[in-house]
Amino acid sequence: MQSLVAFQTKSGNRYVYDRRTKRLLLCHPLLYLMAELDRRGIDVSEWSKASRELPFEIGVSPADFDDSEILYYAEEWLLLKRNDMFAPIDDRARLSRRLTEEDVAHSLANTHHICFETTEACNLNCKYCSYGQFYAGFDGRKNKQLDPETAKRLLHALETRWKSPQNTNPDRRIRLSFFGGEPLVNAAFIKEVVRHARASEFLRDRLVFSMTTNGTLLMRNMDFLVSNNFSILVSLDGDRRNDSYRVYHDGRSSFDDVMRNLETLRAEHPTYFEENVRFNAVMHDRNSVAEVHQFYRERFGKFPALSALDTSNLQQSKRNEFYKMYLDVARSFAENENRSEIEQDLHTNLPSTNRLMRFVNAQLEFSVPNYQDLVWPNNESKVLPTGTCIPFSRKLYVTASGKILPCERIPHAFAFGRVTEGHLDLDCRSIADHYNKLYDEMTKLCARCYKANTCGQCLFKQMGPDGPKCRRFMDYDRYAQHLSEVVSDVEDRPEFYSEAMDTVVI
């Protein structure tokens, strides 16, 4: 496919972008015209010396420029092309890298985050729960609890790999996190795993602990969490009305209990609360960006991550009901009259900022993933299709029934192993083969997508019963619109670009 994408921003500026080299050029209207001619298969050199008629309309008229200008920018365009700009991309060939058994084994030996689903049980019955009525693909919830012995067997097996030569960063911190259900429903499991891990000579100085919780059981476990320096992510959607989807099984609101626990934690351990407690607000039809911002500013003086409801793996029969509850976070922010103040406080949690960060880090030539690419850039190197993580490179997730997945967001049907009595049942070759089969299916779609080289989508979110269906697929027009929106944001708020560049990690 073509590497050239030409687009205009809402301010009227014109740009050309090279998908292969990731170069973005602000250009003169005539250079933009040459790009559009080339993209449509018209010979720029011949056109510039002939009748100069345009079989399309892009808001640039050759009649507004003299001959010397037209010839100059025609030559400028041809010079760019002679210097390795805008060459076609063989997307199918570029997306032909596949995983090997060694890739998976290396990731497993270097995995630094183990997440335990401590229990399937939850004391709340949140309407939008990712394991609830709206979603398919996860095991039925039977209130199973993860056995501490299962976790110990897993940690023992992983410790062998962490100590092996395959671990290229043996001094790295190892995070043990606890998920649910509500993880504190099975607090005994958490306490036993922490005790066991701290007893390991290899682990004890490398450990960090974290937890995602609904906050209802914090009071009775507060001293344990503080003494072990847990990082806590609390789910709270705003004030009482905003939070009204988060109810107990008998329909009672959980809001007062959560607030009481949080206020007690802040009063008794103010430094811990400030440094270790973070928040997540799920956005829906009973809250808004403005309401959530005001609530957190007034009650806690800190601001949450804003999470849209997950639109993947929906039950077909529940889609209409789901979308009545769904809130577009970007639209909710845009509709607010007090955008500048909210933008300052919630900056890094806003969709527009996240989109800009992804654009800078993935779609511009200034950002490289590693030192090797910095020293020896290779625009023709083969890559894996989609933005799917190499299994276990970021996390290893264990369900309450002992199934092993790369993360908690992946449907349980894609489990790649199990912790059984006596050993870890995990075959790196079969995992690589399974991924590669899915990659082969996705490549048929990815090879036609203009965003394929910088995709951030997980393939497990795209696989349906009838094959891959990517919600983020972009043909030329959609990708040009995407670039226009991102660069328009940069033009409106250039300080956002500076911040994105300043936060690039080397």
Image (cartoon, grey):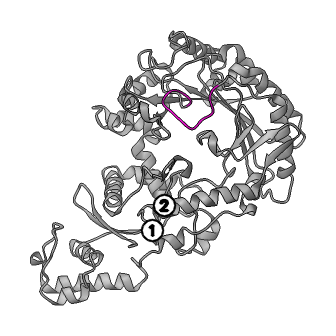
Residue at the spot 71% in from the left edge and 25% down from the top edge: 144
Query: Residue 100 or 227: which is nearer the viewer?
Result: 100
Q: How far, Cα to Cα, is label 1 from label 2?
A: 10 Å
Query: In the rendered image of this protein, does residue 130 appear above or below residue 359?
Result: above
Q: Which image quadrant: the N terminus?
A: bottom left
| Residue 319 in sight | yes
Residue range of the region highlighted in magenta in the rendering: 131-141
Q: In what element is the residue under mark 2?
A: helix
* Quadrant of the rendered image containing residue 369: bottom right
Query: Residue 370 or 126: which is nearer the viewer?
Result: 126
Q: In what element is the residue under mark 1?
A: loop
Query: Residue 355 or 502: which is nearer the viewer?
Result: 355
**x, y percent for residue 277:** 61, 28
Residue 49 in the figure: left or right of residue 224: left
* Quadrant of the rendered image containing residue 28: bottom left
Query: Which residue is under mark 2?
Result: 454
Please rate how many residues cluster around mark 2, counting C-alpha atoms within 10 Å: few if below 14, some from 14 to 19, many from 20: some
Residue at the spot 63% in from the left edge and 56% down from the top edge: 435
Query: In the rendered image of this protein, does residue 277 appear above or below residue 375?
Result: above
In the rendered structure, which disc, 1 or 2, sits on the residue that comes first in sequence? 1
Q: Which mark is residue 381?
A: none
Query: Residue 45 or 313: which is nearer the viewer?
Result: 313
Residue at the spot 41% in from the left edge and 79% down from the top edge: 87
Query: Which residue is under mark 1?
Result: 22
**x, y percent for residue 26:** 31, 67
Please rate how many residues cluster around mark 1, counting C-alpha atoms within 10 Å: few if below 14, some from 14 to 19, many from 20: many
What residue occupies the far front of the structure in this picture? Answer: 466
| Residue 204 in sight | no
